[in-house]
Image (tube, rainbow, N blue to C red):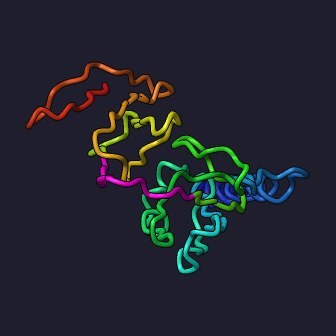
Amino acid sequence: MKRSTIFKKAIVTTALILSVFILVFGCDNPIETPKNTNVGSTEVISITINGDTYLKEASKKEFNIQKGTTWAVIKKRDEIKNVEFEASYQLSKWLLNGETGSELTDNVKFTEKTILYAKSESIPENSAYVSWEIADNKGGSLKAEYVEKGIKKTLPMGGKKIPVGTKIAFTALPDKENYYEVESWNAGGGGSPFLRIS
C-alpha cells in the first residue's frame, strides 16, 4: 500500500512539473512586457537663450530641461530671470524661436530643441521698478498689462521699469482644465489687491 501511494504521488508530481514546463516554454507567443512605456520618462531637450542686439553675450546660454516642461516652470529658472541687457534697455518679452515668433504663455509645452528669444525695449524716463508674484499658482496665474505711449505691453512676474503713474490691469487666468475658477478679488494688507482662485 505504501509503495502504491508513493508511486501515485510521484506520477502526480511529474505531471505537474511537465504542465508548468509546457506552459512556460511551449507557448508560441509568450507574454512580454511592453517595451515602449512612457512611465517615468526622463528624456531631456536643450533650450537656447538668444535675443536682439541689446542682449548681453553672457546671457546667451544653453540648458537642458525634461521633455514636456511648460513655460510656467521654465521662466522661474535663473537663466531666464537673470538675463541682462545693455545700458538703458530691459526685457520686453520672450518669444518662441526668434524675433518673429509668438509670445510665450504659461501653458506652452516644450517637446523639442527650442530657442527662447529675449526681445528688449528701452527703459522709459521717470520710471520705477515694478514687480509682482504669486505665492501658489497651482490653480492658475495672472496676466499683468499696461499701456505706454498707446502700445499695450506686458509686465512680467519678474518685473521691470515702467513710467511712474502707470495703471496696471491684472487678468486672472484660472486653470480651467483642472476645474479652477475665479472666486473673488479681495483687498489684502495695506490695501493691495489679491486674487482668490478655487
Q: Nearer the viewer, residue 14 or 130?
A: 130
Image point (40%, 28%), residue name: 171
Q: Please check the rendered image and state whether residue 125 is part of the magenta-colored stretch, yes or no.
A: yes
Q: Nearer the viewer, residue 183 or 32?
A: 183
Residue 193 vs 41, above or below: the answer is above
Image point (63%, 59%), residue name: 117
Q: Quadrant of the N terminus?
A: bottom right
Q: Residue furthest front?
A: 125
Q: What range is drawn magenta here? A: 120-132
**Is residue 44 visible to us here?**
no
Question: Residue 155: image x %, image y %?
Answer: 42, 45
Question: Residue 113: image x %, image y %?
Answer: 71, 62
Place residue 47 in its image quadrant. bottom right
Q: Residue furthest bottom?
A: 58
Q: Is residue 47 left or right of residue 198?
A: right
Disc count in the image?
Answer: 0
**Is residue 7 visible to us here?**
yes
Place residue 3 in its image quadrant. bottom right
Place residue 43 in its image quadrant. bottom right
Question: Residue 87: image x %, image y %?
Answer: 46, 71
Image point (38%, 54%), residue name: 125
Image point (37%, 39%), residue name: 138
Residue 75 vs 176, above or below: the answer is below
Q: Please check the rendered image and state whether residue 13 is part of the magenta-colored stretch, yes or no.
A: no
Question: Residue 96: image x %, image y %?
Answer: 67, 52
Q: Is residue 84 left or right of residue 112?
A: left
Q: Is residue 1 left or right of residue 152?
A: right
